[in-house]
Image (cartoon, grey):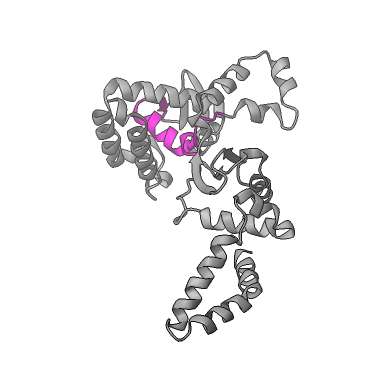
Amino acid sequence: MLEAEGIALAEANIKSIRARLVQNGSTTAANEIIHAEVDRIFANAVPATVSVEDCVSQLNGDARKWARGVLNEAKPLASLETFPDKIHHKKVFLMASGAAESSAYRNVQAAVPEQWTDVVAQNHPSSELVCIVAEECTSYAEYPEIVNLFSEIRGLPEDEFNALATICDPKVLREFYPERTENDCSPGRLLAGALVFEVIRRSGSQNYVYDGDIIGKGCQAALEALRDSTLATEMEQELIRRVSSEGLVSATTKLNEAKQRATVFVPKEFAGRDQFCEWIDESVTHFNRRLAKSQ
């Protein structure tokens, strides 16, 4: 738009430029005469709007295209690495005169893809616009307010709790723990750790016993039982308590040594294909991630 206005202004003054060339052509180089005359014309009549808001307001049907171009230029040079247990989203920070009341804001907001978050606007000098697109990876676990809210909701009487679950089965809501990733609920990792630290005991008749109760007749049944979020949460809390009490270094050594005695804990079909060893490795990684900073 600015280029078109500039060309129109120059063409409107083409006669005066030609006259200046005729008048001073014998004493001054032609390119110097043209540059001086163009500078004079633009100095007296600036061929542009004086603010970003005026410019955007004049775009009419092209404003949305302009906004998409702004967002494309503002995006990060490199995409952020995503994580399975985290929500990947982008946030747009827009600094413009008038903030959320400006035409720039309305057009950028309309051009933002639905999966992005809303546009955050802040007031700024009218002659300049700044747009930054930030990529973020966040987990519900990073917000204590959400974790505490779900904890309080789970403590409600059953009838009150069920009344809150209007778009899903109440059990789904009750078993949702924002602070736990999918790996935290891994039945294999929980079973391996629980057997090594004797939270669960395996009998000679292949019964897997926890707190005096048989949770599974056979390894596969025990794994299925640990898919229950309530039992898995109890198991996780008890394992964290025991590992913290024993010390991370000592507990890690104990877990790694258990690899050499896999058949003591699980049947040959699980020990022979290194399944138990993989669960142990998961446990070591998990406890180091959870407890390394606190010890």
Quadrant containing the C terminus in the rendered view? top left
Q: Is residue 183 magenta?
A: yes
Residue 201 in the image, given as x and y percentages of width and height = 41, 26
Residue 61 in the image, given as x and y percentages of width and height = 74, 59
The residue lying at 48 percent from left, 73 percent from top is 35
Horizontal arrangement in the rendering, residue 145 relative to residue 112 (left or right): left
Asked whether the viewer can see residue 199, the reply is: no
Compared to 21, does 261 lie above or below? above
Compared to 40, does 203 lie above or below? above
Residue 26 in the image, given as x and y percentages of width and height = 45, 86
Q: Residue at the bottom extreme?
A: 26
Q: Is residue 110 magenta?
A: no
Compared to 238, does 53 lie above or below? below
Marker count (numbered):
0
Determine the image quadrant of residue 245. Answer: top left
Quadrant containing the N terminus in the rendered view? bottom right
The residue lying at 72 percent from left, 26 percent from top is 165
The residue lying at 39 percent from left, 25 percent from top is 239
The magenta segment is 177-203
Horizontal arrangement in the rendering, residue 9 relative to residue 268 (left or right): right
The residue lying at 28 percent from left, 33 percent from top is 252
Q: Nearer the viewer, residue 49 or 30?
A: 30
Residue 215 in the image, given as x and y percentages of width and height = 52, 27
